[in-house]
Amino acid sequence: MSKKDEDKERVLKRFQELYDSDPDLRVVVANEKGDIEKLKNMFIKDKELDILAVTEKEEWNWLHRSLMHIPNAEKWTGTPLSTIEFYIKNKVPVNAQDSYGMTPLHYAMRGKNAEAAIALLEAGADPNIPNRDNVIPLAMIGGMPERLDVLKLMLDKGGNPNYVNANNDMSIVKSLKKHVGNVDKFKPVIELLEKYS
């Protein structure tokens, strides 16, 4: 066996040890895979963990944690919709703010997870809740301007295109017009925002 194979085997063995001993890690893996049976067993049947638990320092609930975007992950395609729907169905608060003021909808938008954003909005997520930097989820549409369905749903759910976002003294719609108004992919976004202004 080569040194590289030995190292890989050692890492996999250590991961398995951690996985077996840490229920939080097992939930993280189940979240990523959309393994709803595993989540049901851990939270509902065996009650290994509290589905409404919040981390002490960051104040993350399980929706926040399941939507954490992995920076620069080559193969990350976003949390499966089934995982998000599981937590929503089990009453994990969709508008809970963590220690950074971020809601699960902020994390879905930041992670460009349109399907999760739609599920959260349909479950009552508010697109106007500001985080500690005064950024609302509606303003994060710039990360996925091709998803006009998400934008329209946010606006239909009361998203405010005239909100003065962050610290730039301009509304979301005016800021987009100023900074990316000449970029083709943003023109439909601006047009839709203007309809709701």
Image: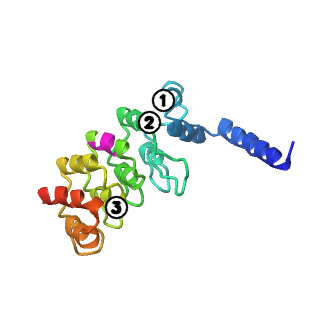
Q: Are marks 2 and 1 in contact (CB under 8 Å)?
A: yes
Q: Where residue 80 sits: x, y (%)?
A: 45, 38
Of label 2 and label 3, which has the lower sequence position? 2
**Left or right relative to 42: residue 182:** left
The single residue placed furthest to the top in the displayed view is 45
Amino acid residing under circle 3: Asn
**Left or right relative to 4: residue 150:** left
**Res 185 → quadrant:** bottom left
**Res 164 → quadrant:** bottom left
Q: Is residue 86 above or below residue 112?
A: above
The foreground one among 55 and 117 is 117
Residue that carries the numbered disc 3 in the rendered image:
131
Asked if the magenta segment contains residue 119, the reply would be yes
Q: Which residue is at 36% across, 65% downward?
A: 132
Instruction: Label 3, secondary structure: give it.
Output: loop
Magenta residues: mostly which secondary structure?
helix
The single residue placed furthest to the front in the displayed view is 184
Mark closer to the observer (2, 3): 2
> How far, Cα to Cα, is label 2 from label 1?
7 Å
Residue that carries the numbered disc 2 in the rendered image:
83
Of label 2 and label 1, which has the lower sequence position? 1
